[in-house]
Amino acid sequence: MSPLEIFSAVFGLFVLAMIAASLIAWSIALRRVWQGGDILPLENRTPVGWGVDGVIVALGLVVLLANAASFVAQRAGWLELPKDPQQTPISLSDMSTLLSIEGGSRIVACGLLIVWLVALYRSSSIDLGFALRWSHLATGLLGVIALLPPIYLLQAILTAWWVEYEHPVLELLQKSGDPIYLLPMAVVAVIVAPLTEEFLFRVVLQGWLESKAMGGPQPTDSQLPQPAAAEQGTPQWQQSEAAIPSTVLAAADTTAAEDPRRVPYWPILVSSLFFALAHLGHGPAPVTLFFLALGLGYLYRQTHSIWPSLIVHFSLNAITMIVAAVSMVVGEGL
């Protein structure tokens, strides 16, 4: 058997196993919904501290640093972009350089954003979605099993019946047949892109939208107005709650902030829409990625963690890159 035949056989078995596991996962999920429960348990959380300013700063940092890095690279002679991409397509080496620059600038932008959120809002690892539990890893693996087969099926249907999938990086790789560019592109596509996109779209954007819908973060004890001093000689434990303003009691009650029933669903739709729009120009990819983002947003809503959605996003891009790499090296389409 040729290497391509061996890979095709192994990959085919993997696909069949994923489809079977996905059907089982969805049958269990639908049964839970039918019984009036949640597909995944909803972990309690308090709303994040940042507002729309966090989203604006995130977008500004990403755009500013990407443009600045591209400008510096062109001035230094490391990158040469065609004036008319329609007439003169970008070369593979310049595409590799451009992706590396964009990936590096995104990492720096997210790093600066984290520093800004921690310094200004005292954001914790839980707020930033980086608090890790073993259950989050298990949830991510379940997400891979449940989401990837129907997403790939939808992509195949749209490609066959609507418009062909387009991705300039994969097309350049397959045309060139040069594996030297695989590593930098794989690092950007499989590691940098999922990490930065999940942090920006799920943690920053969806986290802010959830916080806004939940009424914002609750004040800490030190921020609460203090009740008037008790009458002289009256023990503190004997003071009546009637002497404390109702607004203070309401603010001091943090149970509502951790009530899972207050976490809305509509932020998932909004963040998924922006996630899809960010991938315009790749054929039917925005439609497919919108439905993928619904699943990623649900994973974030239930866990308030970046790890489950990151594992799914990482797996999707890794499988795509593996298939593209094998197709390029062997010289045949799969």
Image (spheres, helix red, strand yellow):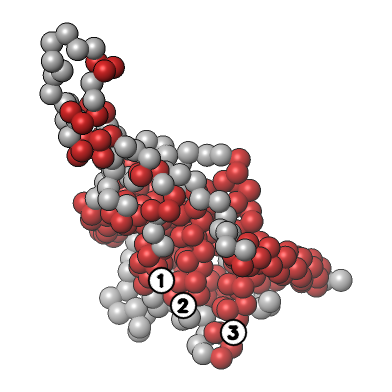
Q: Residue at x 55, y 51 (%)?
A: 41
Mark 3 or mark 1, which has the lower sequence index? 3
Give the x, y percent position of residue 30. 63, 67
Local secondary structure at mark 1: helix
Q: What is the CA distance from the residue labelled 2 to the residue labelled 1?
A: 7 Å
Mark 2 and mark 1 residues within 8 Å of each other at the beta carbon: yes
Q: Name the one closer to the observer, 177 or 16.
A: 16
**How packed is label 2: few (under 14 Cα within 10 Å), some, or many (20 or more)?**
some
Using residue 307 as the reference point, say whether residue 327 is left or right of it.
right
> Which amino acid, mark 3?
Ile
**In which quadrant of the rendered image does the C terminus lie?**
bottom right
Residue 224 falls in which quadrant of the image?
A: top left
Local secondary structure at mark 2: helix
Using residue 244 as the reference point, say whether residue 80 is left or right of it.
right
> Which amino acid, mark 2?
Val
**How packed is label 3: few (under 14 Cα within 10 Å), some, or many (20 or more)?**
few
Q: What is the CA distance from the residue labelled 3 to the residue labelled 1?
A: 18 Å
Which residue position is annotated with label 2? 287
Which residue position is annotated with label 1? 276
**In which quadrant of the rendered image does the N terminus lie?**
bottom right
